[in-house]
Structures are given as C-alpha cells and as structure tokens.
C-alpha cells in the first residue's frame, strides 16, 4: 500500500465529515466498461469485497480506493480495421477516402472493436488525514491524481485543496543537499539521483547504486545540472525517491518498521496503519527540511492561488487525465 505519494493540503473551508464523504462516494462507485466504452473509473471497496463500504477508517485515518478499467486496443489492430474500410470504399467507389473521412472511419473502427477488446484494471489508494488535513494519492503520474481529485470535487460541496507547496522547492532543496553533501536532519541520501541540464541541451546524468555525496556530483550541480530525482531514507525507516515536483516515488518500508509492527503485518488494517503512521511522520519532517509550507499552501479558509492547484477539472480534461498512461498495479493480497 502506497508505493507513491502525491500530496495535497485540504482547504480549511472544507470540514471533513465521514458520513458525508461516504455518501458522496456512492455517486461515483466504480462501474465496469460497457461494450462500447473505452474506459471507466470510480470508487471501489478498499477491503476488496464487493458491496463493502467505500470509505474505511483505520486509527482515525480514512482510506479510499480508486479503480479504473481500460479497454486495450493496440494501434496496429485499429489501423488494420481502418485500412479494410478504406479498401472497401475504394473498391466500391473508385476513390480513396480523404483525411477527414479516415478519421471518421477510425471512430467507426474503434466502436467495432471495443466489444472484442480485453480489459485491464488498475487501482490506487487515497488517504485522508482529517486532523492533519493531508490528502495523499498513491499515483505515479499527476494525471491520475487529478482524476481522483476531480471525482471527489464533483460530488463534495465545498471541497477544495492544493498540492503541497514549500518555501524551498524540492529541486532547490535537493541541489543544496548535494552541494553540501549532507542530507537534512532525520534523512540520509541514498545511492541514486538524476541530474538534468538547465541550459536547454536536455542532457541527463543518472547515478544508480552509486554514492551521490561525491565531488563529481557537486561539480555537475555547480555547472548547472539540477536534480530531478534523489533517493533518500527517513529515520532509517522509509526509503523513497523525491522528485522535483515534490512527489514521493518507490516508497519502501524498511525492516525496522515491520519489526515494530510485530506479528500483525499483513492484511488491510495492518497495511493501512503502517502506511499512514509512517507517512504521517515523514511528511512534516520533509516539509521542515524544505523550510516550511509556502505561500500557496491552504490559508485563510481557502486554498491560495497555486499554479499546480487541482480542484474541479473540466470534463474533457478529466477524461484525458483518466486516460493518462500509468503502470498497472498488482491488486492487494486480500482480494
């Protein structure tokens, strides 16, 4: 549970209400794709049992699960059907279909093929901390997180939030730590980072299984190559990769976390408790390491202006976000 974390701050104007949220989720319950539907997304029971509640509370932390189904239609298969239709028109009329007509034929081909297409399902977790006012989405792509936030906004009156923002950007923070060859308090630097040139050359340097606290890395940063990813460990308990967009990827609970949990380290409740407890402590420390929350954090009862603000997306953008490519996640063992 929670291999990635895209982190939001809930607006003070929205007061979390468990029953209200539970009722709102019902309006967006997941429905499988129809025969001619390319994709479908919605809420499913976190515990994995059909008919169960769509919102679970574990230790006062709220867990949701978003599920998406997509029909898999390889482009060559669609193009082959279009070519067949074009050939039939040419044989019947003696003319080749133009570009506009070919686009229409492609839409027809998609409708023809969708009922025969295989379906792929993937899911991601959503965690709401109603006290600390975090909302965390287990997505490796921003488009997926936007689709989740949009669905929540669609059915929740007054719901607003902003992406986590800090006084010092994640990229500036990572650059400083690499220049100083020292991680902030409570963290350590691991053996992986990615540096990108800032001069438009698109040069990229990657270090994997290699020390990053070395003069070579420092020189690259001094020469203008800025970190876009940096592997770190928090308190010897959680390893992760921090990105320039202030996202956490490749989150891994280390052995000490499982040892502290004792014998009960499997099942939904144990997974939820570990994830929310560890991230609930890690996130404030990360914010402190980046000099606190920035001006575009949630203030004055509303989310302050933020170029990365995610509230209600227009319908077209929501559909595009839902269709954004992302790796398929394995379903949890309790299903």
Image: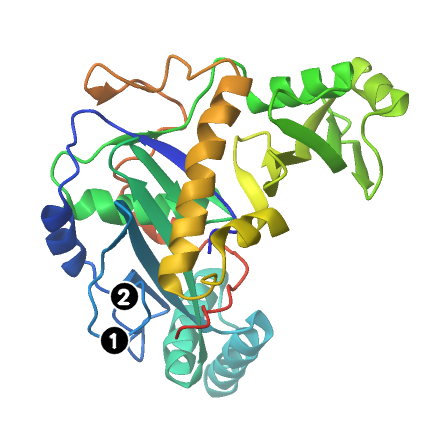
Label 2 element class: loop
Above or below for 167 versus 324 = above
Specify the quadrant of the image occupied by residue 280: top left
Residue 50 numbered tag: 1
Query: Do the residues under discs 2 and 1 have CB atoms within 8 angstroms?
Result: yes
The residue positioned 23% from the left and 46% from the top of the image is 152
Label 1 element class: loop
Q: Nearer the viewer, residue 246 or 322?
A: 246
Specify the quadrant of the image occupied by residue 181: top right
Above or below for 25 versus 115 = above
Mark 2 surroundings: few (<14), some (14-19) or many (≥20) residues within 10 A: many
**Relative to residue 18, is residue 128 drawn left or right?**
right
**Relative to residue 13, is residue 8 drawn left or right?**
right
Above or below for 304 versus 50 = above
- What x and y, as percent, mark residue 123? 41, 62
Residue matched to label 2: 45
Above or below for 62 versus 333 = above
- What x and y, as percent, mark residue 62? 27, 48
**In the rendered image, is residue 121 in sight?**
yes
- What x and y, as percent, mark residue 1? 46, 56
- What x and y, as percent, mark residue 217? 83, 24
């Amino acid at each position: 549970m929670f291999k990635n974390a895209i982190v939001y701050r809930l607006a003070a104007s929205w007061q979390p209400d468990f029953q209200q949220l539970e009722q709102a989720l019902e309006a967006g319950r997941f429905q499988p794709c129809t025969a001619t539907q390319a994709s479908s997304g919605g809420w499913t029971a976190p515990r994995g049992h059909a008919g169960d509640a769509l919102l679970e509370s574990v230790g006062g932390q709220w867990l949701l699960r978003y599920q998406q189904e997509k029909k898999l239609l390889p482009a060559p298969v669609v193009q082959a059907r279009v070519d067949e239709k074009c050939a039939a028109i040419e044989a019947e009329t003696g003319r080749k279909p133009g570009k506009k007509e070919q686009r229409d034929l492609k839409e027809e081909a998609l409708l023809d093929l969708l009922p025969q297409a295989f379906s792929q399902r993937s899911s991601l977790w959503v965690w709401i901390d109603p006290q600390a006012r975090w909302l965390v989405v287990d997505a490796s792509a921003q488009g997926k997180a936007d689709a989740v936030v949009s669905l929540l906004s669609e059915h929740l009156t007054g719901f607003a939030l902003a992406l986590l923002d800090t006084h010092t950007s994640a990229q500036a923070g990572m650059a400083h730590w690499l220049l100083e060859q020292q991680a902030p308090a409570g963290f350590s630097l691991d053996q992986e980072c990615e540096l990108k040139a800032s001069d438009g050359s698109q040069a990229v340097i990657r270090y994997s299984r290699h020390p990053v606290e070395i003069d070579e890395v420092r020189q690259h940063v001094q020469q203008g190559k800025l970190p876009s990813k940096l592997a770190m460990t928090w308190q010897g308990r959680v390893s992760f990769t921090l990105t320039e967009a202030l996202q956490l990827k490749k989150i891994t609970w280390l052995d000490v976390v499982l040892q502290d949990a004792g014998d009960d380290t499997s099942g939904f409740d144990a997974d939820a408790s570990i994830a929310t407890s560890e991230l609930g402590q890690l996130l404030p420390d990360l914010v402190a390491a980046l000099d606190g929350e920035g001006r575009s954090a949630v203030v004055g009862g509303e989310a302050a202006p933020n170029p990365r603000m995610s509230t209600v997306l227009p319908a077209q953008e929501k559909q595009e976000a839902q269709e954004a490519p992302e790796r398929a996640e394995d379903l949890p063992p309790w299903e």
